[in-house]
Amino acid sequence: MSEPRWLRSVRWIVLGLLTIFTLTPLYVMVSSALKPLDEVQGAFHWVPTTLTLRPFVDIWKTIPLGRYFLNSLVVSASATVLSVTIAIFAAYSISRFRFPGRRVFSVTVLSTQMFPGILFLLPLFLIFVNIGEATGVQLYGSRLGLTITYLTFSLPFSIWMLAGYFDSIPRELDEAAQVDGNGPVGALLRVVVPAAMPGIVAVAIYAFMTAWGEVLFASVLTNDSTRTLSIGLQEYSTQTDVYWNQVMAAALVVSTPIVIGFLLLQRYLVAGLTAGAVK
Amino acid sequence: MTSTTSPPAVERAAGEPDRRPARSRRKRPALPYLLLLPALLFELLIHIVPMFVGIGMSLLHLTQFFIRNWSAAPGAGLSNYRLAVDFHAPVGAALLRSFWTTVKFTVLSVGLSCLFGMAAAVLMQGSFRGRGLLRTLFLVPYALPLYAAVITWAFMLQRDNGLVNHLLGDDLHVVGTNTHAPFWLIGGNSFVSLVAVSVWRSWPFAFLILMAGLQNIPADLYEASALDGASWWRQLRSVTLPMLRPVNQVLVLVLFLWTFNDFNTPYVLFGKSAPLQADLISIHIYQSSFVTWNFGSGSAMSVLLLLFLLLVTAVYLVSTGRRRSDV
Amino acid sequence: MRIRKITPGVVLALLAASAAGCGSSGKAGQATSQTLTYWASNQGTSLDNDRQVLQPELDKFTRQTGIKVKLQVIGWPDLLNRILAATTSGQGPDVLNIGNTWSASLQSTGALLPFDDATLAKIGGKGRFLGPSLAATGAAGKAPAGVPLYGQAYALYYNKKMFAAAGIDHPPATWPELVADGKKLTHGGQWGLTLQAGQVTENAHHAAILGAQQGAQLFDSAGKPHLSSPQEVAAIKQYVDLMAVDKIVNPSDAEYTDTSTSLKDVATGKAAMFMNQASQGSFKLVGMKLDDLGVTPIPFPAPVPAGGRHVNSFVAGINLSVFKNTKNRDAALKFVKFMDSADEQKILNKTYGSLPVVSDAYSDPAFQTPATKVFQQVLATSAEPLPEVPQESQFETLVGGAMKTMFADAANGKPITDEYVRAKLDQVDQQLAASG
């Protein structure tokens, strides 16, 4: 593409502004995490006058951060694995078969994306409680309950994206696999899934991020021992004090692995989106 | 691009009937349903059945006196709905105001996110030094857990000790300082803050999708238009934007639904009681049900919201002509 | 084919849904007979601090009775939702803390065990409790929905050094005095008074206290809301005017949502006065020298308005309730008795800086300090419970929220007129009426 000269300056100005916009909160997060409490609570200064690593030690004592992190990780990871698996099967069905009800299913599932969480939060809670009483399977207050809730949050979009991705994979591939003696499911697992890996990774990232940041359902469906980070981090604000520096330090500690993982996988994300939903 | 309008499966099934898959389909007519079953079960359990229960709740006079024993709650008929849409009474008026706030918020947030995403994606099309680094940086807000990101903003937006007033007042002198400093978490500016935080969180997603979309535009289209002597600007308008249209349509819809229903961002930024000017509908309904324990009324409002979203989505899909006939 | 495949799922889901219709059939806790689940509220510096404070006491209880107690400390932002969830589902703890202002609201759900006289007798009888605290356990004429656990009251804290520097030799006893003192104390980055003006419940508390002083009846005997009465309008306007007209409150306070910010303002000399519940411990934590900290009751109006009541606090505090569905009622009551025993009352209230709710605990020298005596006096003689009506929690949310908006407007320089306040309160009245 031919680039005029003025574009260079526009590019640097626009990208520069976006960089500042993006970076500023990140800088605040890092610098505040390194300040002692009284400095964080005082007027803002760009450069900390006292640097301390103390908040990174204290965060583990003020709240059971490790447990919350583990809960979030277990719930988000299980929700991701389940959501992606279920979405692969559903998307394959939609992409490769023509059957009555296919459209109804697609539209229904997609429209659940529109349901206001607030509408079904309380009914869902009651259903969980009643299933617990009827079957002994504890969904309320357990990681399991939160996991299956979260998996459905990412399911509609995941199915839709993967169906698009599968459409772009030549049918000759799975037909060839079926000639080799595989059933349709065998063809899906041996041929389509490997070919769709970038799309699957993209969907997995999306599913993970959806579960990782959720606040509303976590506030009702968890208890002390299953509380996740998005709720747990709020405990740095207590009756007597708001430990801003610890909030920032904890946010940093729990975000770092996720951000790194995300950035490592981002090339799949772009590749997956390229071939999938955005076609 | 082609699969959007002509799904390969349909094409093939009609044009070039292939015996093998046809046979396997005949042999296992249940298979496609079996493959859908897990998705269907979970959607039923988590979304669809609770939604019908929610609709049922909206027809009950379900206040604190009855939440312990729903079967005793008196039927309310449509009175919860009448209350919600009686825009002359305070409850309805507040709901309507919150609704318009949400519409304004959604339009601004989605518009700016798309604009920023588009600008960044287009400007980063060519290769230049630091492109990879920038791309990585731009994606960080999307990867950050919501609570961590939004609470940082709340910290920055404090009047006395926040970065925003420090930057705008002490450093740039565009707003007053000390007793003349503006508020960002209460009053009219809280709306601006909410939009800024929302855009900060969602524009990277737009960027990501549009970047992927750009990679799909065949290079020969650009080459052809360059041969015609088209300027960069003209190329942008005649090649890039039209080619991105389908992507943009999906993106806008997805962002619209997320933003309109967003509960987490205002909740973390303002707490349970958002300032009037930033009282988004999800928070408003939460207030009307969970905080005041009037679930009948809250459910009725949610159902109205759902109807609105369904309507908008349907109209949008029809008017943009985006019919993934296969999905 | 399709139908057959989907059916089991639909049936299962419908079963679940129909079961949801009778949510009260539940059992409380999954506890075996000798383990109690106890939900404690956040009283200490952090949830963890609460666990550290309570666990040794719970262990003591287990040693005495053989009954185990499973402790969950729940933060305030979560507590009401968790209680709501427990109420709706019937799956709750055996024993729980509630904010005493929620008593009538929670009582109306029927989820809490009524403490009738026979039940009260099991834990030592009514007579042991401070009258006002006991009055804040539910609607009048109904068996209490719990018993008091920690007592609290409001008073006016002031920074003695700042008062001395401004040449004021005694704390204000009336509102005109407070405003006059406040003006003397307000200059150059220092303010007369700090308010948690962005805090919904704090605002609602002051609406009730100042309203009582003006003679307002927030709810009539039939439970109908009357917040837009001239008395209540005057009370709320007076409160907002501290910032809007008297200008002795920093407009920034409109953003204050947590106590610690105000405590620090007093400790660091940014503000001279603060109306708060007993909080010497928290003051100490933010670096306030307790010698410099004065306490006096919240002022009264002068002249006293017609019908005004001699009130300068509401009966604040935490109650201990038993979940009605508990399968361990006797054990739960034993636990309540234990927590309200003189010894535990001394230990816990001393640690948390709150006031014992039983008279026999006051012998402890820790509760004989001048500061504590001020609170005691207020709680015993001039405190009135918040309206004991089922809609109390809605009242707090709506009034407190409206006041938060008023403060935001005041802070942004909008004039706060009687009309404006009345319109806002009128709206609250109608919303309360609609939800009732």
Image (tube, grey):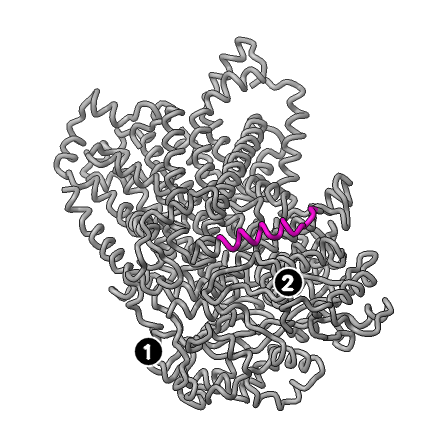
For image coordinates 28% across by 42% down, the residue present is: A89
Identify the main secondary structure in magenta: helix
Q: At numbered mark 1, what does the secondary structure look like: helix, strand or loop?
A: loop
For image coordinates 73% across by 68% down, the residue present is: C302
Q: Quadrant of residue A110?
A: top left
In-front residue for pair C387/A264: C387
Dot 2: few (<14), some (14–19), or many (≥20) neighbours within 10 Å? Answer: many
Q: In the displayed image of the protein, which residue is found farthest to the top?
A: B228
Q: Quadrant of residue A129?
A: bottom left
- Would you say residue C193 is visible in this rendering? yes
Chain assignment, label 2: A
Q: At numbered mark 2, what does the secondary structure look like: helix, strand or loop?
A: helix
Q: Which labelled disc corresponds to residue C403? A: none
Q: What's the distance in space between the residues labelled 1 and 2, CA to CA? A: 44 Å
Q: Position of residue B56 (x, y in %)?
A: 30, 51
Q: Position of residue C434 (x, y in %)?
A: 44, 53
- Where is mark 2, residue-wise? A55
Q: Which three-letter amino acid code belongs to the residue tagged 2?
A: Pro
Q: Is residue A199 above or below residue C102?
A: above
- Where is mark 1, residue-wise? C327
Dot 1: few (<14), some (14–19), or many (≥20) neighbours within 10 Å? Answer: some
For image coordinates 63% across by 89% down, the residue present is: C364
Numbered-mark total: 2
In-front residue for pair C146/B145: C146
What segment carries the magenta color? C414-430
For image coordinates 68% across by 25% down, the residue present is: A9
Q: Position of residue A241 (x, y in %)?
A: 63, 65
